[in-house]
Image (cartoon, rainbow, N blue to C red):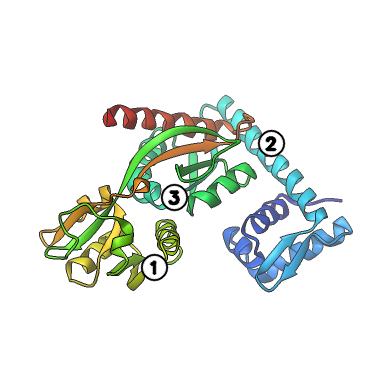
Amino acid sequence: MRFELTDLQLFVRIAELASISRGAARTNMSLASASARVRKMEELAGARLLERGRRGVALSAAGRALVYHARLVLQQIEHMKGELSEYAGGLRGLVRLQANSAAVSEFLPEALGEFLAAHPGIGVDVEEISSHEIVRAVAGGFVDVGIVADIADCSGLQTFPFAIDRLVVVTQDGHPTARRRVAFRDLLEHEFVGMVATNALQQHLSERAIAAGKPLRLRVRLNSFQAVCRMVGNGVGLAVMPETAARRFKTGALRISRLSDSWSLRRLHVCVRPDGGLTPPARELVAHLRRQGERAQLGAV
């Protein structure tokens, strides 16, 4: 029974995303090629590896066993690459990192810029998803490092402080909620300018609105905080976003107000598995992010 490394990488991505098509896309492979590889793997294994459904695929018992061993093999190869490259005069490798919206847009650009400049042989694959999904991916060994908000339950993972993120309300000058502290529930009677549906922060806000019993009244969805601020400035609606983004894109037509909800002040944490199985490049990145977190904590004092 011989599986190629490409097969193992593909199958792990399919398992992570619960979709053959999405797994194929993330491994730069056509759907037809990915499907053919999965069929070949099932022939070699002599068992069905995936259960197909209308909403994607799920792992069979044999598929769960294959994912477990595939992750071990791929992690060991990354360890080997890292250790050998140290002898060659510098770390080389790829680190898989998942982070929430605030981390990706507000805190990681500077932190990763410094890291990548100091480690030219290391690449970082960054994916933006919700904090709860990140915890599952890190715990399952699908990614090396996660950055999550403190709303996520990181039980069983090792965590380190990374940044402090405050969500604020951005409105046009003259809006009824401008210049005063306001509860998120009280905003729900107004129309919102939001981010695209796949944005992790937008998903979080939608969940908060549903919990409050008043779904968001979204007038328009956009793909950047800058575009959101411009739309708010033109009177389309209000928005909730990280304070750092709001202040960066603020114009004279905008007003920033704080939310009174306790969840609006969020502490971001780096999370990793506690088994010490990180590759050398991943350990270097975590050490760098921890130093960033220590500086953020000092700045907050």
**Is 251 on the left or on the right of 208, as rendered?**
left
Q: Nearer the viewer, mark 2 or mark 3?
A: 3
State the SS at label 3.
loop
Residue 295 position within the rendered picture, expressed as x and y whole percent measured from the top left: 33, 28
State the SS at label 2.
helix
Q: Mark 2 sits on what residue?
A: 76
Q: Are marks 1 and 3 in contact (CB under 8 Å)?
A: no
Residue 149 position by quadrant: top left
Residue 215 position within the rendered picture, expressed as x and y whole percent measured from the top left: 40, 69
Q: Residue at x 46, y 44 (%)?
A: 148
196 above or below 283? below
Mark 2 vs mark 1: which is more N-terminal? Answer: 2
Q: Are marks 2 and 3 in contact (CB under 8 Å)?
A: no
Q: Nearer the viewer, mark 2 or mark 1?
A: 1
Mark 1 vs mark 3: which is more N-terminal? Answer: 3
Residue type, label 3? Asn
Q: Mark 1 sits on what residue?
A: 214
Residue type, label 1? Lys
86 above or below 173? above
State the SS at label 1.
loop
71 above or below 224? above
Q: Mark 3 sits on what residue?
A: 100
Q: Residue furthest right?
A: 46
Residue 72 position within the rendered picture, expressed as x and y whole percent measured from the top left: 71, 40
Separation (CA) of disc 2 from disc 1:
49 Å
| Mark 1 crowdedness (10 Å alpha carbons): few <14, some 14-19, many ≥20 | some
Q: Residue at x 56, y 27 (%)?
A: 86
Residue 171 position within the rendered picture, expressed as x and y whole percent measured from the top left: 20, 62
Labelled disc at residue 299: none
